[in-house]
Image: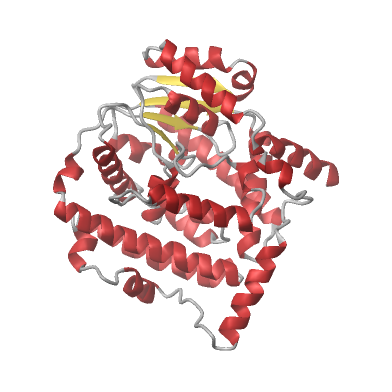
C-alpha cells in the first residue's frame, strides 16, 4: 500500500526533504544566472502562454464578457501572488507553470473549437451534481455514482488536460503529473486517492478559468479569494459548460448523465444550475468540526510545499470562514431549487453504503441496477486499505500534539 511506505507526517506543516533540496537548487540557479527566474507578470505570462496561437484562438466561442473576466482574473491573481503569497522557489515555479498552462490551454481550446465548432453544441444528458464541503465524503459518493455504467465521469487526466489528443497520451501526462506530485508530497494519496484515468473532480476545469478554488488551497492569496467570492461566477461556468460539452463529444458518452463534483460548487451553485437547470443534486452532510480539521490538514499540506511562511492559525481561521460561507450559500440555493435532491450522511455512508446509495437512487428517481451495484462493490473493494485510510490517524496525532 502506498501509505505504508510514506514517512510519518508529524505535523500539518511537515514537508518532504526533497522540497527543500529542489528549492535550493532553483534559488542557486536563478541567483547565479544559470537560468532566469520565472516571471509572474500577467502581460508576460499571457505572451508566453499564447505563443504559437492567435488572438482568435483566445476569443473563439467565448463572449466579450467571458474574455474580459479571464483577463481581469489573471491580473488580480498575479497581483495577489506578488503581494501576499510569499512563495518559495518551488512555489514560484509552480505558479508560473500553472498559470501559463491555463493560458495555453485556453488558446488551444479556442483553436480546437474553430476547427470543430460542433463540439460546443454537443447535447448532454442532465448531469448528477455531488455537493458538499471539502472532506465531507464527496469523493466516495462521486466515485460510487460514477461506477454505475449508466453514468459517465471525468477522468483526472481530462480535468487537467481537456484538449483532445490523437493518440490520447493524456493518461500518460496525468501519470507523470501524479508521479511528480507524489515525489514532492508523499502524503498526497492519504488526502485524496488519485489515478490518472480514474474518475475525479473537474477542479482542473475551474482552474483553467482562473476560479480561485484551486489556487486558494495552495497559496496565501486572501485578496484574490475575496475578489473571486464577490464576483459573478457566470463566466467561469460558461467555460465549464463548454469544456463539459467538448469532453462529452470527444468521448462519445454524451447520452449518459455526467456525475460532476467539485466542493467549489457549493459556493457557486446558482451559476452552475443556470447552465444545467435540469440537474439532479446529491448533498453530502458531515459534522463541520470534522470537516474543518480535515480541510486544514489538506490545505496546510499543499501550502507548505510552496511557501516557507505558512501560518497554520490563519489557515484554521480562514477555512472555518470558508466552510461557513459555502454552507450558507448552499442552503440558500437549495431552498429555491425545484428539482430532485438526495442527501447523504457521512457516518451512515461509512456504516452501510449500499443502503445510502439505494436511498439516493430512490430520491433522484433513478434505477439502481444489479450491474450498478456490482460496479460499486468493485469500487469499494478497490479502495479498501488505500492510502486515504491513514489520514484519520494523522488527524488524531495532530490533535493529541496540540
Quadrant of res 208 = bottom left
> How many numbered circles are shown?
0
Residue depicted at 44% across the width and 25% down the height: 147
Against 339, residue 65 (above or below) is: below
Residue 395, placed above or below residue 335: below
How far from the left and from the top, in percent, is residue 301? 65, 53
Would residue 345 appear left or right of 14 to someone viewing this image? Answer: left
> From this viewpoint, which residue is outermost toward the right?
401
The correct choice, above or below, for 243 with respect to 114 in the image is above
Instruction: Identify which residue is drawn at 45% across, 30% down.
Output: 130
User: By what rule are the colours in the image chosen?
Assistant: secondary structure
Q: Nearer the viewer, residue 238 or 147?
A: 147
Please tell me in which quadrant of the rendered image residue 245 appears.
Answer: top left
Residue 304 in picture, x, y percent from top left: 66, 60
Residue 362 appears in the picture as rendered: no
Which residue is nearer to you in this view: 315 or 255? 255
Q: Is any part of residue 396 visible from this angle?
A: yes
Residue 57 drawn at (x, y percent)? 21, 62
Give whichever of 24, 85 is nearer the camera.
24
Taking the view exactly as shown, the residue that stands out farthest to the bottom is 32
> Can you say which quadrant of the picture contains the N terminus?
top right
Q: Please, which residue is most extreme toward the front here?
A: 167
Residue at the (41%, 26%) spot, across then down: 281
From the viewer's perspective, is residue 172 above or below residue 287? below
**In the figure, is residue 380 to the left or right of 41?**
right
Q: Where is residue 136 shown, x and y percent of the image?
A: 58, 33
Task: Describe residue 30's horizontal placement relative to residue 129 as left or right.
Answer: right
Amino acid at each position: 500500500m502506498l501509505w505504508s511506505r510514506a514517512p510519518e507526517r508529524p505535523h500539518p506543516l511537515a514537508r518532504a526533504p526533497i522540497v527543500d533540496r529542489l528549492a535550493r537548487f532553483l534559488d542557486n540557479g536563478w541567483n547565479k544566472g544559470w537560468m532566469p527566474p520565472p516571471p509572474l507578470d500577467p502581460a508576460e505570462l499571457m505572451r508566453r502562454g499564447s505563443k504559437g496561437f492567435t488572438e482568435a484562438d483566445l476569443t473563439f466561442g467565448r463572449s466579450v464578457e467571458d474574455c474580459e473576466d479571464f483577463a481581469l482574473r489573471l491580473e488580480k491573481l498575479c497581483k495577489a501572488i506578488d503581494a501576499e503569497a510569499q512563495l518559495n522557489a518551488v512555489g514560484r515555479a509552480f505558479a508560473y507553470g500553472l498559470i501559463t498552462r491555463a493560458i495555453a490551454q485556453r488558446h488551444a481550446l479556442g483553436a480546437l473549437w474553430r476547427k470543430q465548432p460542433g463540439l460546443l453544441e454537443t447535447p448532454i444528458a442532465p448531469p448528477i451534481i455531488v455537493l458538499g464541503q471539502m472532506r465531507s465524503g464527496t469523493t466516495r459518493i462521486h466515485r460510487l455514482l460514477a461506477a454505475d455504467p449508466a453514468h459517465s465521469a471525468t477522468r483526472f487526466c481530462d480535468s487537467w488536460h481537456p484538449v483532445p489528443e490523437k493518440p490520447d497520451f493524456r493518461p500518460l501526462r496525468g501519470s507523470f503529473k501524479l508521479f511528480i506530485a507524489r515525489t514532492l508530497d508523499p502524503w498526497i494519496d492519504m488526502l485524496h486517492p488519485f489515478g490518472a484515468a480514474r474518475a475525479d473532480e473537474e477542479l482542473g476545469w475551474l482552474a483553467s478559468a482562473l476560479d480561485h478554488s484551486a489556487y486558494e488551497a495552495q497559496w496565501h492569496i486572501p485578496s484574490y479569494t475575496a475578489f473571486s467570492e464577490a464576483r459573478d461566477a457566470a463566466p467561469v461556468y460558461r467555460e465549464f459548460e463548454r469544456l463539459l460539452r467538448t469532453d462529452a463529444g470527444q468521448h462519445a458518452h454524451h447520452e449518459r448523465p455526467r456525475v460532476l463534483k467539485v466542493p467549489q460548487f457549493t459556493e457557486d451553485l446558482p451559476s452552475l444550475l443556470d447552465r444545467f437547470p435540469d440537474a439532479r443534486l446529491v448533498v453530502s452532510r458531515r459534522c463541520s468540526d470534522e470537516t474543518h480539521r480535515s480541510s486544514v490538514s489538506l490545505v496546510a499540506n499543499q501550502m507548505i510545499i510552496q511557501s516557507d511562511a505558512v501560518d497554520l492559525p490563519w489557515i484554521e481561521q480562514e477555512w472555518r470562514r470558508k466552510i461557513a460561507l459555502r454552507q450558507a450559500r448552499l442552503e440558500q440555493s437549495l431552498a429555491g431549487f425545484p428539482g430532485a435532491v438526495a442527501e447523504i450522511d457521512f457516518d451512515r455512508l461509512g456504516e452501510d453504503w449500499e443502503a445510502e446509495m439505494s436511498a439516493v437512487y430512490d430520491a433522484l428517481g433513478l434505477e439502481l441496477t444489479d450491474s450498478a451495484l456490482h460496479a460499486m462493490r468493485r469500487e469499494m473493494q478497490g479502495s479498501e486499505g488505500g492510502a486515504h485510510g491513514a489520514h484519520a490517524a494523522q488527524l488524531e496525532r495532530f490533535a493529541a500534539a496540540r
